[in-house]
Amino acid sequence: MEVLIVDTPEEAAAFAASAVLDGLRAYGTGNPVLGLATGSSPLGLYAELAAAAQRGEVDFSAARGFALDEYVGLDDTHEQSYRQTLIREVCNVIGLPESGLNVPNGNGETVAQIAEQAAAYDEAIKAAGGVDVQILGIGANGHLGFNEPASSLRSRTRIKRLASQTREDNARFFDGLDQVPTHCVTQGLGTVQEAGRLVLIATGSHKAEAIAAAVEGPLSASCPGSVLQLHPDAVVVLDEAAASRLKNRAYYDDAAAGLQFGI
């Protein structure tokens, strides 16, 4: 795992975008395949990717994107559905076509139908050649996607109950807590781990405890983010506030300096 710590959220966005672009070059075999996260943490990263596209460093016009998750029972035309959120915050920003955006289907007449659609989502990722780079945020309780604490570290895309804290955190986007869906369809932690590179960005002191548990804590379903420790190419980009509870800070800074020859 590579841990990069910078002064500000703006710098974190720039470094995380560079990690994404490097990952696309390393793992991509044609048109980019991106794993897409919602939330406030990756917004600056997406803006940096848009700037890179404008400079001609990358072209997302034929890219495919796979969302991490979607609410159960929320129509995909709903303003707060993750399909509509990603259209606003990613497609319209970096130039990824809506036709290339894939989002789990959280609607169906039965639980079994939604479960079948979830399994089909994993198959669609495989059919696309796999995700080149998965962009991630982390919840205050350590969740990745909507993999709440106690999620299996090898889980696949499936229906998941949202934690009370997650629903409370997301209530600001709805007309009250009672309007927030109770369930979601989320990529599993096993699904996420199949991406070529993972790039997690976190900023702010409210993420510091979750980051410390994910990066330096034991590998545990109690902190789903700790699954990053299993991945051969995971990059974690933090601002000072999010990194404030890390114990091995000096080493991360030394490692980030890189290997120098001729000294």
Image (tube, rainbow, N blue to C red):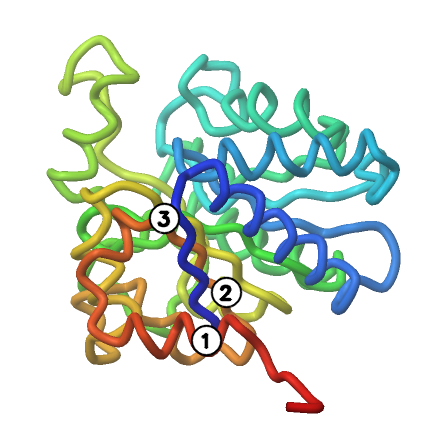
Three-letter amino acid code of the residue under disc 1: Met
On the picture, is 117 further left or further right than 94? Answer: left
Q: Residues within 10 Å of mark 2 (few under 14, many from 20)?
A: many
Three-letter amino acid code of the residue under disc 2: Val
Q: Which element carries disc 3, helix, strand or loop?
A: strand
- Estimate the x, y position of residue 50 in percent, counting from the top left: 70, 31
Disc ID at residue 109? none
Disc ID at residue 1? 1
Question: Which residue carries the number 2 mark?
Answer: 235
Q: Which residue lies at the image location 20% right of the left edge and 31% below the top edge? A: 169
Q: Which element carries disc 1, helix, strand or loop?
A: loop
- Estimate the x, y position of residue 105 in percent, counting from the top left: 50, 37
Q: Which element carries disc 2, helix, strand or loop?
A: strand
User: What whole-number distance in Å separates the C-alpha atoms at marks 3 and 1?
Assistant: 17 Å
Q: Quadrant of the N terminus?
A: bottom left
| 36 up-or-down from 3: above or below | above
Question: Which residue carries the number 3 mark?
Answer: 239
Report if the CB atoms under discs 3 and 1 are less than 8 Å apart: no
Mark 2 against mark 3, which lies toward the viewer?
Answer: 3
Q: Which residue lies at the image location 50% right of the left edge and 32% below the top edge? A: 43
Residue sitting farthest toward the front: 263
Q: Earlier in the sequence, mark 3 or mark 1?
A: 1
User: What whole-number distance in Å separates the C-alpha atoms at marks 2 and 3?
Assistant: 13 Å
User: What whole-number distance in Å separates the C-alpha atoms at marks 2 and 1?
Assistant: 6 Å
Q: Which residue lies at the image location 45% right of the left edge and 20% below the top edge? A: 75
